[in-house]
Amino acid sequence: MTTRRELLGQAAGVMAGVGFTGCGLMRGAAAQAPGPARPRETVVNGKRVTTVDIHAHCHIPEALALMGEKVRFPGLVIGPDRIKVMDEQRIDIEALSVNPNFWDKAERDLQAQIVKLQNEKVAEICAKTPERFVGLASVALAHPDLAAEQLQDAVKRLGMRGALVGGSVNGMELADPTLHPFWAKAEELGCVIFIHPQGTPELEASGRLKGSGGLYNVIGNPLETTIALSHLILEGTLDRFPGLKICAAHAGGYLPSYPDRTDAMCANRPDQCPVPLKKKPSEYLKQLYFDSLVFTPEGLRHLIAEVGVSQIVIGTDWPFPWTKTPVDHILETPGLSDADRIAMLGETASKLLGIKS
Ligand SMILES: [Zn+2]
């Protein structure tokens, strides 16, 4: 058996080759340098833990071709290289999702065609290697009735475990009542909905995110997630569908960093919060799930303090190289119990994704 100390020792150097690109936005793609070979197993206090990454992307070239697009980042096509990287990261199982939602503005029929093909191909990849992959479906969210049907088809017929949706769709908020049929279906199916930002094109258009630093991504993406989750809370969507299992990418954007400001607004300016809620806005964070894509032990400690350890699952965003040490991040954060680590490493994600150990 490999000890934790040995595992941590072997983590050294894995960050070599990490560069930064746009998550899902396919800009500024950098070549990947493979990390050193390493054992795959993760053990906590003598217990073998199945590590699960809820935030991993793939592209299906045939589906992109229907929009006249090509895969612009080779790591998005699933092949033996992906398994190798997962082994290096000590990720046992990835929940694969397609991002960005490049079909959002297409005609309804074309969206239906893209989503069907994409879901069937992702399901095929998962069926071929079920011990390493599960699938999150794509849906045509701009057409909520169709999206609800697609979600049901993906879960019931294709064995997918939920779906990825953007933080908005063609300018429509996820809390828009038009989307209630979709949320009702997700609640009925009991499957996870992974909210992944599509950037903030409105801000990009203003030019304020131009310049050094990739702000369209670094700020634009977490900002969209923050807005999406805030509306779902404040418009009463989460009260209306209390059984929803929502997981937010990038640790929920900025929301877990500053939720008390929302509470203060509703407490001190009730005229600004006319929708009656069953609890304080910040308390809804404890019923949402968040990936672990914060970059420091202090970031993870704070996320845990705000949302609870039971709400956090690994997210790597692979193949966009934000982190190559997702498991070590959780193992190395001080002050956690073995049970906390086991929950975040895979136990909670396994429950959310219906993965049986
Ligand atoms: Zn992503």
Image: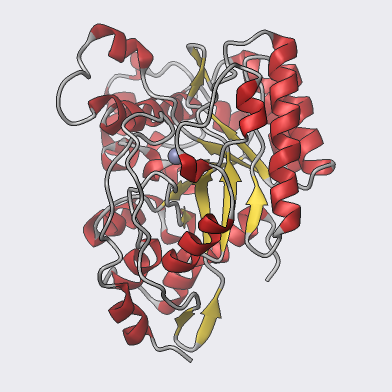
Q: Quadrant of residue 113?
A: top right
Residue 293 or 272: which is nearer the viewer? 293
Q: What quarter of the picture does the C terminus occupy?
A: bottom right
Above or below, comparing residue 216 to residue 302 in the picture: above
Q: Quadrant of residue 201?
A: top left
Residue 179 or 275: which is nearer the viewer? 179
Above or below, comparing residue 195 to residue 101 in the picture: below
Above or below, comparing residue 182 to residue 43 in the picture: above
Question: Which residue ends up furthest to the right in the rendered image?
Answer: 157
Q: Is residue 188 visible?
A: no
Residue 194 pos. (x, y %): 55, 39
Q: Is residue 155 left or right of residue 200?
A: right
Q: Is residue 222 left or right of residue 174?
A: left
Q: Residue at 22% of width from left, 19% of height from top?
A: 209
Dividing the image into four quarters, tell me where ligand 1 lies: top left
Residue 256 pos. (x, y %): 33, 42
Q: Residue at 69% of width from left, 33% of height from top?
A: 118
Rendering colour mode: secondary structure
Q: Is residue 200 left or right of residue 141?
A: left
Residue 19 pos. (x, y %): 27, 47
Residue 350 or 286: which is nearer the viewer? 350
Q: Residue at 29% of width from left, 13% of height from top?
A: 203
Question: Which residue ends up furthest to the left in the rendered image?
Answer: 212
Above or below, comparing residue 155 to residue 269 in the picture: below
Q: How many marks?
A: 0
Q: Is residue 170 visible?
A: yes
Residue 81 pos. (x, y %): 51, 57
Q: Residue at 40% of width from left, 30% of height from top?
A: 26
